[in-house]
Amino acid sequence: MSEARIRWISGPVLRAVTQDVFHVYEAVAVGPSALLGEVIKLGPDEFVAQIYEDTTGLKPGDSVAGTGQPLSIPLGPGILGTICDGLLRPLEAADGPFFRPGARSRSARRFSFEPTVLAGDRVRPGQPIGKVATLRPQLCLVPPDAAPGIVQWAAPPGEYSDAEPICRLEQPGGASREITLAHPWPVRQPRPVSQRLPIAGPMITGQRILDTLFPVGRGSRAALPGGFGTGKTILQQALAKWCDADVIIYVGCGERGNEMSEVLDELPKLPDPRSGRPLMERTVIIANTSNMPVAAREASIYTAITVAEYFRDQGLHVALMADSTSRWAEALREVSGRLGELPGEAGYPAYLSSRLAQFYERAGRVSTLAGAEGSVTIIGAISPPAGDFTEPVTMHTRRCVRTFWALDRGRAQARFYPAIHPLQSYSADAAPLARWWQAQGNPDWSAQRKRLLELLEAQVRLERMARIVGKDALPPAQQLTLLCADLVNEAVLRQSSYSDSDRYCSPQRQTQILNVVIRFIDLAHGAVAAGVHPDRIGDLPICRTLQRIGEEFGEAHIAQIRDLWKELDSEFSGLPHERTDAR
């Protein structure tokens, strides 16, 4: 075992002198409490390490022991349904409000295991060798770093801890390897896959403004930037509850303690709309508040994505909610400053963009080593200071993601939720997802989406003009544009997470709402062209019905939305006659 002595220490960063061999990213045990750390820089006779726990009490001369292994976390069936810290230690094992320095914990639970292989079977890395009965069924996999081998022995059905052997493999050269329910994996190393697959379908969020205007593909990457109070956490909780992912990973990276406590209190209580059971049964929460060691904040992001890849390798679709990557970047900046590195823009290290890219590129839709299809979709929240989207973290993130959901403070202050600005947001996944929407019965989805965005863009331009000359001075066609844009905002874009009927909107209901709103716009333009004043159109009863279509027509009333077409045609057919009588 390699050993060194601390020469200098500042917060989470230390320098140690040694004559032994250490490696970059090697995990180390520091001081008498064996605090967990990681080598991040090597010199001729010294190295720099960052510590993931509180370094109070460490001093020059304390020992630093190398483990010979990279920083790793144990991946096993006990992860699902737990609340952990940034090093994947279950919070229920903590001594008081914080973990005891140097504490390590493994799951003390026992799991019901049923083998799916027999002695003599040939297995390969990533292949399932058994099933584990937990809150939701899981697979026990041959570790991806294992060599192909022949099963010498498989444990009979029964209950086992995650450290007990459940299979023994004979590997090339005559060596044997025991497989347990849990296996370690380096957090900074992506887990291997058989093949990366292109985007084929959306991750349905149940939010109309996202699925209709700015969809995110399953296995894609999305950014959610917004200033304080714009609704990032509420929106991420709504996505966690309603998105069609099999497993939810929620990582609170450097968030305020009171906000994180709300998440820890509320998220486990949310019911799963699929099963009616607690949503926590298919969720992993990684909590790392701002008062925890800063280096652990930097590691928590990699811990979360490694856990997500573990479930992806079981053929599951995983959604990772990171809140927020700005706090993670601030941790990079603090550690970089203690290292004396040359700062980049806004004091962030020069490698900020590459670290962001390394994180987001671990998302994807893949064919696993076992041949199943799995995916990891990353939704990273950003907290730009004063809502400035030109700051470095937001700008570099835009290069890494395909979908950008920009939260707007003005909309949030007007109580318009989700407070996503339709003209500052975009989705590069919209084009490849058009075929999926066509298969769902909406062949005009791309054209309708484009039309709504053009209408909202015209609204901004005309409102600027109306503030100068007054709305009544605008031509009737332009007044109608403002009327239709307001209807789109109310009927399509506004959606309350607290509404029992409208907190989730299925693709089928979204299609019907979109079709009837587009039909209204077409009929309204025809009426104005025939000489009807836009005020007359705005006074129609059907207009008020459409403004509350999400609230009044829930998932059980999709067929009634189609019936609104008859009301539309009936009310608009009477407009020219009423206009003639009035004249």
Image (cartoon, rainbow, N blue to C red):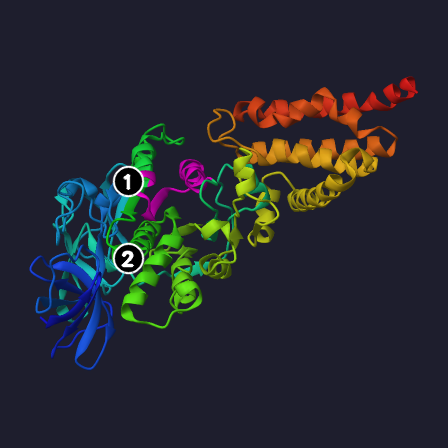
Numbered badge on residue 122: none
Look at label 2 and name its amino acid: Ala
* Residue 559 against residue 169 in the figure, above or below: above
In this orientation, which residue lies closer to the viewer: 461 or 135? 461
Q: Dot 2: what SS?
A: helix
| Residue 18 seen in the current view | yes
Q: Dot 1: what SS?
A: loop
Q: Position of residue 562 (x, y in %)?
A: 65, 26
Numbered badge on residue 299: 2
Residue pointed to by mark 1: 137
Left or right: residue 57 versus residue 245 is left
Look at label 1 and name its amino acid: Pro
| Residue 417 seen in the current view | no
The quarter of the picture where residue 550 lies is top right
Q: Where is residue 223 in the image (x, y as percent from the top left)?
A: 47, 51
Sequence order check, earlier mark of 2 and 1 = 1
Q: List the single residue furthest toward the left.
A: 32
First to last magenta residue range:
231-259
Image quadrant occupied by the C terminus: top right
In this orientation, which residue lies closer to the viewer: 426 or 480? 480
Q: Position of residue 255 (x, y in %)?
A: 34, 46
